[in-house]
Image (cartoon, grey):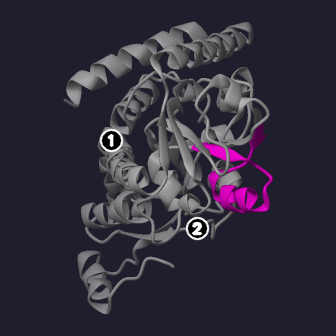
Amino acid sequence: MLKKLALTSVLALGAAVPGHAAETLRYAHFMSAASWQNQTIFEDWATAVETASGGAVDVQVFPAQTLGKAAAGYDNAVTGIADIAWTVPGYTAGRFPLSQIMELPGLFETGAVGSCAFQKLYDSGALDEEYADTHIVFVHTHDPGHLHTSKKPVYTLEDMKGLKLRRPTQVVGELLTNLGAEPVGMPAPNTYEALQRGAIDGYMLPWESVDSFRLDELTEYHTVFGFYALAFISTMNKAKYDSLSPEAKAAVDANSGMQWAVTAGRGYDEEGAKVLERLKTESTVIELSDEERAKWDEAAQAATDSYIAFLNAQGLPGTATYEAVKGYVSDCETELN
């Protein structure tokens, strides 16, 4: 479960930092140890930081909620239960309102572009108040999420009526309500059990997550519509970051920001493409007609307008931030091509 170091690595650490034990960083996330995220996002980041530090840092990766439940991820970083936590801001309703603009439908088409835009938004300083009590390492999104149902195929808005659908956050829940469904809030790791018990009829997730959480075992129908894209953060206990040695801090800083944001987002794109191709042969993938898509787009736009108006009414720069994100998306589409 924990990241293991061979004896030769331990000896190398001692040689690299004479007389000093490596500083340990505990990195917690809620994906399984066998997931691509565990390797591509977390273990690879750990190795990069250890290498950059010259042995001053030992990063231990804790997968599968072993250092706390998914919904408590941010608070676990704040309190130091984990030194670094990868989590979803939207799991804590209302706490990160400007960050959740990234969840709104139709902003971008890939996880790489969404991640780049989210990182630019964070780097602009617009989110400083939302994350004042931790030290952000990097932020990212997944690619747009779609609708997946166990027993009932969804071809039209009429088909959505009355369906109990897992929603990741309140923002996405409002979109589902506009579309006629009944949203049921829960973190992604709880979806399998809820679907198995019949507590929900389906769920909203990107393609790769259908595989990562083994939901393809329980899901027959997949309706293609980019409902939302979830925002993720990798964030560090502030006191822990401040206490790092110069070597350790420099290694963390060198592996913060855009490089890892895009790595994470691109990972979702690449894994999602593989899963979609498989699902096309094993289940039913539904493409909306042009006429029907226009209806769904109208409902999605209404949810977007409602959320931006809500932010503005709270005295937050909802419109300005939304427009800034659209600009960052355009920039990222050019930069990543």
Give the image location of residue 311, x and y in percent: 68, 14
Q: Residues within 10 Å of mark 1 (few under 14, many from 20)?
A: many
Give the image location of residue 268, x and y in percent: 39, 47
Does the magenta portion include 195?
Answer: yes
Give the image location of residue 53, x and y in percent: 29, 63
Give the image location of residue 275, x and y in percent: 40, 54
Q: Secondary structure at mark 1?
A: helix
Amino acid on which disc 1 is placed:
Val
The circle drawn on residue 185 is none
Q: Residue at x 37, y 53 (%)?
A: 252
- Whether residue 237 is visible, yes or no, is no
Q: Nearer the viewer, residue 192 or 125?
A: 192
Q: Nearer the viewer, residue 251 or 260?
A: 260
Q: Residue furthest bottom?
A: 7
- Whether residue 104 is visible, yes or no, is yes
**Is residue 298 left or right of 182 when viewed as pictured?**
left
Which badge, 1 or 2, comes first in the chain's sequence?
Answer: 2
State the CA–CA distance, disc 1 to disc 2: 23 Å
Q: Residues within 10 Å of mark 2 (few under 14, many from 20)?
A: some
In this picture, which residue range is highlighted in magenta? Answer: 183-204
Q: Is residue 85 above or below residue 57?
A: above
**Is residue 65 left or right of 251 when viewed as pictured?**
right
Q: Secondary structure at mark 2?
A: loop
Q: Residue at x 64, y 12 (%)?
A: 302
Amino acid on which disc 2 is placed:
Ala
* Residue tagged 1: 262
Q: Quadrant of residue 217?
A: bottom right
The circle drawn on residue 64 is 2
Location of the C terminus by quadrant is top left
Q: Residue at x 35, y 32 (%)?
A: 116
Q: How many callouts does the rendering have?
A: 2
